[in-house]
Amino acid sequence: MPFLLEPNRRRTGRDGTDYPRQVYELGALKRGRDPEGARDPTADYALGEFLELRLPWGMLLLTDPSRPRAWYAPEPLPIPGLGLRVEGLGEAQFAWKGWETPSFALRLKPAYFRFREAWAREGAPGRP
């Protein structure tokens, strides 16, 4: 069964304008084709030496990723983590600690270095 999001239902404005229904299928996973040294930011999964899978928290029915809670009843319930089963490969369990402020690290993406090298060879854009 498809996992659909309907942010806008069909409706008619006061002036008679018809606004069509908008539906997005959230469950359709897009395979990534990673360029060398970078990731495809629009991909949901990539299969190479290993399987990389990126799923939205909402698709997993998690109410708030900063708290290990899932929406399986009339209210969110605490969960110990998530399990993944791949036929022929077995099972894996994933658990995480809750947080108040997400941790992050600033970094330069691989494209930065490629642009820097290209501009150094050809001169910066706008320079003679």
Image: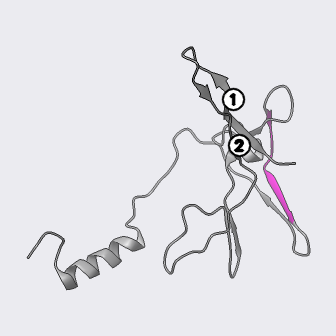
The residue that disc 2 covers is 58
Residue 84 magenta-drawn?
yes
Q: Quadrant of residue 126?
A: bottom left
Q: Disc 1 residue type? A: Arg
The vertical placement of 59 against 46, above or below, is above
The vertical placement of 86 against 64, above or below, is below
Q: Quadrant of residue 100?
A: top right
Name the residue: 68% across, 80% down. 48
Q: Residue 95's spot in the image, x, y percent?
A: 74, 53
Between residue 80 and residue 37, name the one nearer to us: 37
Q: Disc 2 residue type? A: Gly
Q: Quadrant of the C terminus?
A: bottom left
**Residues in magenta, as a range:** 77-85
* Left or right: 45 in relation to 75: left
Decide if residue 57 is in sight here.
yes
Q: Mark 1 to mark 2: distance in Å?
A: 20 Å
Q: Residue 112's spot in the image, x, y percent?
A: 34, 71
The residue that disc 1 covers is 9
